[in-house]
């Protein structure tokens, strides 16, 4: 271990108690997703372990402590997006500690948060998506319920642009077949209504009518009766299973290996390419900020520029 690398120790009882109270605070109706809460608590816990040799109380934390920890992380090559989140975690904790009376000042107020590098998302071309659907349709035979479900999952991801966690969390009652609408529960337990098209409806209906009953019959006791998507063992489909499916489908394509978020990016970009309103896409994706959605306009503009340069005689 490098001499510059501090040894992580177990935080004091006071620090651990503060961490537990902070987690309770984050969970109490602040609209944060479980994943965000877990990330914040993990970040603060790691910071506490590093400063455990120097500090036993939250009130002893200084701005230099915060800066030193973040600097060491940056030197280790951690991504800017992760750095930005860890900085946000610390700032949230120190602000809460002041408000809770555990500290007299908030050192995080003067902590400059590194900006996450914004890279353009991977987008799967329409032609590649067409090939993927042809492949999935060939596998979705009546005697292959897993193949039927795979087709339904990819159709829904691409048709709606929902997050993989939102897909896995869908229940049977969340489908409005009459209006082709999903009731989606997103970040912070916020619900939104998302439309889908005829191909997704056909794939979804076939899964419900042909594929799902086969899985249910195999393990009737263990079946999760409320879940829309289930495994061959009758449990709700998990995020990892969907990620593995999409990654395997995209491997070897021009897009390269990518996860379900690539289908979300593609859905948004193709909608904007087709003339959809930016605010409508924002609602569809469940973005709290229009600025988050605007990154897809950059993708479309870059495509337009490339097309112009390749096609215009005086480009």
Image: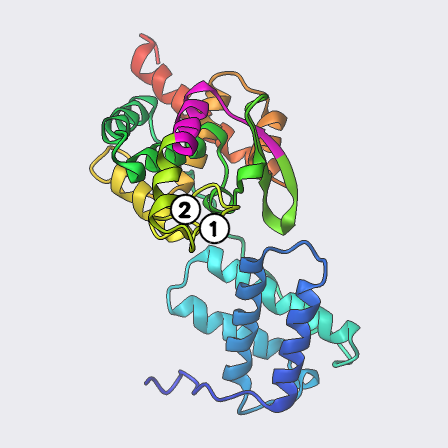
Answer left or right for 135 relative to 34.
left
Q: Nearer the viewer, residue 149 or 38?
A: 149
Residue holding disc 1: 224
- Frontmost of labels 1 and 2 is 1
Is residue 167 placed above or below 188 in the rendered structure?
above
Q: Residue at x 46, y 27 (%)?
A: 159
Please say if the residues under marks 1 and 2 sit with CB atoms less than 8 Å apart: yes
For marks 1 and 2, give the CA distance: 7 Å
Residue 98 visible somewhere in the drawing: yes
| Quarter placement of the N terminus | bottom left
Q: Residue at x 25, y 29 (%)?
A: 141
Q: Is 309 inside the magenta-drawn segment?
A: no
Q: Give the tally of numbered discs.
A: 2
What is the number of the mark on residue 70?
A: none
Residue 123 visible somewhere in the drawing: no
Residue holding disc 2: 230
Horizontal and vertical percent position of residue 167: 48, 42
Quadrant of residue 120 in the image? top left
- Way the structure is coloured: rainbow
Q: Which range is magenta? A: 193-209
Q: Is 205 inside the magenta-drawn segment?
A: yes
Q: Nearer the viewer, residue 144 or 313?
A: 144
């Amino acid at each position: 271990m490098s001499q510059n690398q501090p040894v992580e120790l177990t935080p004091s009882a006071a620090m651990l108690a503060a961490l537990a109270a902070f987690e309770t605070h984050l969970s109490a109706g602040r609209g944060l997703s479980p994943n965000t809460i877990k990330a914040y608590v993990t970040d603060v816990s790691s910071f506490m372990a590093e400063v455990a040799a120097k500090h036993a109380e939250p009130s002893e934390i200084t701005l230099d402590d915060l800066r030193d920890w973040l600097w060491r992380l940056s030197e280790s090559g951690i991504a800017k997006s992760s750095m930005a989140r860890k900085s946000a975690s610390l700032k949230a904790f120190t602000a809460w500690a002041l408000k809770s009376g555990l500290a007299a000042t908030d050192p995080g107020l003067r902590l400059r948060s590194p900006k996450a590098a914004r890279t353009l998302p991977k987008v799967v071309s329409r032609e590649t998506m067409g090939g993927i659907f042809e492949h999935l349709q060939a596998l979705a035979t009546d005697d292959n319920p897993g193949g039927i479900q795979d087709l339904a999952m990819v159709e829904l991801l691409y048709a709606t642009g929902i997050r993989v966690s939102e897909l896995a969390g869908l229940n049977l009652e969340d489908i409005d077949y009459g209006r082709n609408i999903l009731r989606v529960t997103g970040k912070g337990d916020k619900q939104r209504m998302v439309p889908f098209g005829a191909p997704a409806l056909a794939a979804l209906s076939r899964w419900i009518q042909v594929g799902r009953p086969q899985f249910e019959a195999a393990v009737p006791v263990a079946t999760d009766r409320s879940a829309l998507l289930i495994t061959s063992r009758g449990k709700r489909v998990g995020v990892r299973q969907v990620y593995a499916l999409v990654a395997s489908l995209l491997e070897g394509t021009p897009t390269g290996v990518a996860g379900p978020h690539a289908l979300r990016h593609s859905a948004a970009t193709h909608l904007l390419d087709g003339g959809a309103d930016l605010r409508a896409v924002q609602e569809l994706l469940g973005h709290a900020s229009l600025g988050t959605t605007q990154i897809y306009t950059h993708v479309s503009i870059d495509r337009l520029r490339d097309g112009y340069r390749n096609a215009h005689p005086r480009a």
